Structures are given as C-alpha cells and as structure tokens.
Amino acid sequence: MTWAVFRAMLLSLWRDPGALVMAFVMPVAFFVIFAEIFANAAAGDFRLRVAVLDEVGSPASKRLLDALRRDPAVARWRVVADRAAVEHAVRDGGADAGVIVRADGEPLDAAGGFGPAPLLVVSDRSSAVAGALLTGRLQQAYVNALPELLVKSVIDLADSQFTELNATQRAEIAAGLDDMREEAQRGRPPAWSLGDLIEEQPVAGSPRATNQVAYYAGAIAFMFLLLSAAQGALTLLEERDSGVLDRIAAGPGGSAVAVNGKFLFLALQGMAQTLVIFAVARFGYDVDVLAAPVSWLAVAALSSAAAAGIGLALVCVCRSRAQAQTFSTAFIMVVSAVGGSMVPRFFMPGWLQDVGWLTPNTWVLEAYSGVLWRNVPLTGLALPAAMLLLTTLGTLLAAHFFTRRMMLN
C-alpha cells in the first residue's frame, strides 16, 4: 500500500508540467539569478556608466581621465558639454555617476590646498555605492597616472609646513608625523589627504535612506499588484467552469464584458493597494509622495493597469486553475527578481540589467525613481509611461483573445 501511494504521488507529479517546473526549474532559476547578483556584488565587479566633463583640458587632466577610462570598473564613458549635462545624466539615470575636472578648483597637484577640490564627483543619493566607487577609482587613477604630482604635493606640503629640510626640521617632521599618527589612532584624520582632491555632490534632494524606502515602496507595491491581479483573475476560470462565463458571453457584449469588468476592478484594486503602501511610506518614513502628485498618480495608475492586464493574460492563457496558479506565480517571481523588485538592479551584472528592460518591473521602477527622487517632470516620464501603456494594451488584448479561445474549447 505504501508503494501504491508513492507511485500515485510520483505519477501525479510527472503528469503535471506546472508542478515539475515549480519543483525543479524554478529553484534553479532563482538560484542562478541570485547567485549572479550576489557573486557580482561580493566580487566588487560593479560596472559604472560615467559622465565626464574636463573643464581644464591640461595634459595632467587628460592623463588622469584616460587612466580612469581604462579602469575595468568603468563600463560606459560619456563626455558631455557642461556641468548641467553631467547632473542631468546622473539625475535621469543615463549615468551612474559623473566626474568634473573643475576649472575653478585647485590645481591637481595642490593636495591640502585651501580652495575648492579640483575634482567633483556627481552622484545620486539613491545609488550612493556608485559615487563611492567612482571616488575610489578616481583616487586610484590619480596614483597610477600622476605619481609625480602626488610626490610633488607631498614635498610642497612638507616644505610649507616644516620649512627647509635641515636636521632640526627633520626632527620637527618626525614629531609632526608622530602627531599625525596619534591623531589618526584617535579617529581624527589629517587635514589633508587624497580625499582633498575630490568633492562629492549629490543631485537628488532626499537623503539616501529615504530614497531607498521610496525605491522599495514602488518595487514591493508592483510585485504584490501582480500577485493580487493574478489571484483575482482566477475567478475568470471559476466562472468558466461553473457556466457563468457562458451566460455572460451570450449577452450583447460577449466575453469582453467579463474581461473588461475584471480589468477595471483589478486596476482600481491595484490603485488602492498602491495608495496604502505609499501612505505608510509617507507618514512612516517621510517619503515625499506629494512633491509631484500628478506625476505620482499617473505612474500609480499606469502600473496598476499594467498589473491588471498582466494578471488577466497570465490566467487566460492557462487551461486550469491549478495550472494558472503555478504559472502566474512562477512568472511573477522571475520578472520581479530580474526587474529589480527584490534586489536593486545596480547590484546586478550588466547582462542581467539588460534583460531587466524586458520586464514591466524595471519600467515601473524607472518611473517611480523619476518622480520620487530624480525630480523628473511629467514629460520626462514619456518612455516608461509609453512602455507601461503598451504593456497594458497588449496584455488586455491577449486576455480577450485567450478568453474567446478558452470558451471555444
């Protein structure tokens, strides 16, 4: 009898493609996705898109930027015309960070000077890792490309602080170095360092923590919109099995009435879910949702409509409730992982970031990031809005098509 129960369970699994996928394919898919993400992060293999402006145009600045460009951490290099273009590239996501060799700054060999730093790193607070990484790579490029300026700056510093290097001054230098070492041990950095060469300027107005909360508000909201829409769309299969759908289809509107009615309900339900999540983000974590209310409402509406269309299409393409539950859950989990709803896309390897553009999650997050921390005007959201609208129309048409085919079978 035990063997008979075992055999029945085995045959049931073997004859259910959805169960096989969930048992053996989905775990492998998730493992590969997260292994790629965290292997990339652990190895420090981040690839930066950098916007560059050289206002000085000296041989030293060209050598420095050439060394930075050859750095393996730099994936894409974009030379722009002015500072506004650098800030715009970082703000709208065209670059992860930017670097400016400033004409109004100290010379590159003036470490410890009293004027503005010669190098300005422009970063987005929501991707603080990118700014820190570019700063580190810029310091490394300076050491590699301009060693004579580094030595000169140290000599100039010694000459200005300790005067001429005779025996007495050597003793003073030794004492001064001892003082520096003691200050460093107390956690007080010296008044000069390679860091004096670089100033960082964030282009987003909100603190980094608030931006991260805003990111995950949009990411988690859309993932659960997809799950709720798919769950709600399952009633279409229940109505088909009970004969209710046939009676609706016999009316003047046909099966389109059922599909459109469910789409409208799921879209409004998604809006309500989104409002609740962002209300918590606003009052619990100070996310400034109302900074651009019209843009935010537009993105929320488009994302809710897209989730409703996707949920209906995923269910209508399946033949049974069990199959729809398995397939829709698997699909939503994969696109959410690849699209950035679980882990920010910046931590992903380049090829996985490129694949992410095929998911609706990425376009939703691009739209929310533009509204909530990049201060992009409504017209600047045209591309993600168009992609979400096309997704909505395409999936809704697919739901109509598969519903009619489902009723004919």
Image: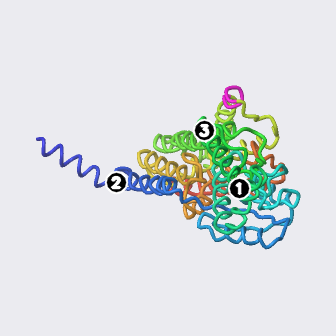
Residue 404 magenta: no
What stretch of residues is rendered in magenta? Answer: 280-285
- The residue carrying mark 2 is 24
Which residue is denoted by mark 3 in the rendering? 182
Choose between 179 and 143: the one closer to the eye: 179
Residue marked by disc 1: 166
Decide if residue 2 is on the left or right side of residue 86.
Answer: left
Find residue 199 and report its horizontal and vertical position in percent: 76, 50
Look at the numbered disc 3 and give the secondary structure of its residue.
helix
Q: Element under label 2?
A: helix
Quadrant that contains the N terminus: top left
Residue 89: x and y, percent?
Answer: 77, 58
Q: Amino acid at mark 3?
A: Glu
Q: Is residue 281 magenta?
A: yes
Mark seen at residue 233: none
Q: Nearer the viewer, mark 1 or mark 3?
A: 1
Identify the secondary structure beneath mark 1.
loop
- Judged from this view, the residue extending furthest toward the left is 1
Q: Is any atom of residue 253 visible in this view?
A: no
What is the spatial separation of the Cα atoms under label 1 and label 3, in whole angstroms?
24 Å
| Residue 322 falls in image quadrant | top left
Identified at 80% across, 59% down, the residue is 86
